[in-house]
Image (cartoon, rainbow, N blue to C red):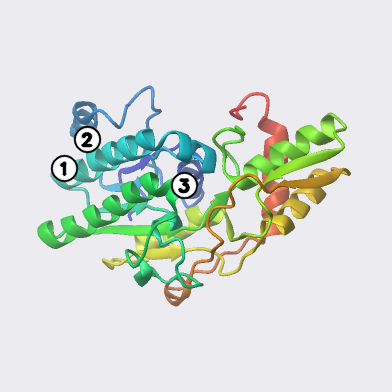
Amino acid sequence: MEKAARIYVAGHRGLVGSAILRKLQEQGYTNLVYRTSKELDLRDAVAVKEFFDQEKIEYVFQAAAKVGGIMANSEYPADFIRDNLMIQTNIIDNAYRHGVKKLLFLGSTCIYPKMAPQPIKEEYLLTGELEPTNDAYAIAKIAGIKMCQSYNKQYGTKYISVMPTNLYGPNDNFDLKTSHVLPALIRKFHEAKENNAPFVEVWGTGSPLREFLYSDDLADACVYLMNHYDGDEIVNIGVGKDLPIKELAEKVKSVVGYEGEIHFDTTKPDGTPRKLVDVTKLTSLGWIAPTSLDEGLKKTYTWFLENKESRVRV
């Protein structure tokens, strides 16, 4: 991508999109385009077409999505499949119709089968049943991947799809009803510390294994792949190692400085037993995640403390 290229970051206020926007600015890209959801409803096909008509976009980072944790996915599956299908269809199709040079589609590792062999290789896609708690979201993302591949095949476009592992970092969602596990833990431990609560309750048994990638590292990988990868196949983005939720909770407890106990509510679902991505393809392309989990947790908690009154959705 040329430094002055017209680059659209869809979903620029979210965890992923905001990190991509920061990374592009850091690397000297000067012609960036973005809209809030109030300014442009990406579910509105007419509005998205008018936006592309006006803005003459050359490159697209498609990071806009309706996202949430186990509770939100379980309670609002229709919202997740409908909104995500509409958003990505409008963006991908308009990118093609307006001659966009290249598009990067952000998927998720929830696209892989619930019981996929570990670590998860890209070729495991569609080889087994999905995790039922978020299958609506996963199916929407799989449709986005297939849409990119189909446009490449039929129209000769250059659309690439990346599958990030579990993410965390600045601009995450800390709403306990809709957030993912790591930001939820940060908020729970912080509030327990403030309120001198004797214990913090964590969903599930604490045994599931999860991998966590700092959002700014994901952004770095996305910009890197936009400049160095033209393949049709999906690419996993992760760190290549995981840890039990129980150990993650202990790390968050330490970073926050909470001194009470951790109680696990075993009546709540665990989700997928393990979800570690194979990053062999990514490392062979020349990229390795630079931020350790301990370092990333400290940065994220610092951001939370600085922004919880004005920016965090609580």
Mark 3, Cα crowd under 10 Å, few <14 / some 14-19 / many 20+, is: many
Circle 3 or circle 1, nearest the eye? 3
Residue, disc 2: 52
In the displayed structure, 54 sits above or below 62; it is above
Among numbered discs 3 and 1, the one appearing first in the sequence:
1
Q: Is residue 207 left or right of residue 213?
A: right
Q: Is residue 173 left or right of residue 187?
A: left
Q: Nearer the viewer, residue 27 or 188?
A: 188
Q: Which residue is tagged 3?
A: 133
Give the side of residue 154 with respect to residue 28, left or right.
Answer: left
Q: Nearer the viewer, residue 76 or 298?
A: 76
Q: Quadrant of residue 157?
A: bottom left
Q: Tell me where residue 60 appears, x and y as whole percent.
A: 31, 47
Dot 3 amino acid type = Thr
Image: 76 above or below 223? above
* Residue pictured at 60% horizontal, 42% vertical: 170
Q: Residues within 10 Å of mark 1 (few under 14, many from 20)?
A: some
Q: Amino acid at mark 2?
A: Phe
Q: Secondary structure at mark 3?
A: helix
**Is label 1 in a helix, a strand or a loop?**
loop
Residue 98 tag number: 1
Outermost residue on the front side: it is 267
Task: Determine whether label 1 and label 2 are within 8 Å by CB.
Answer: yes
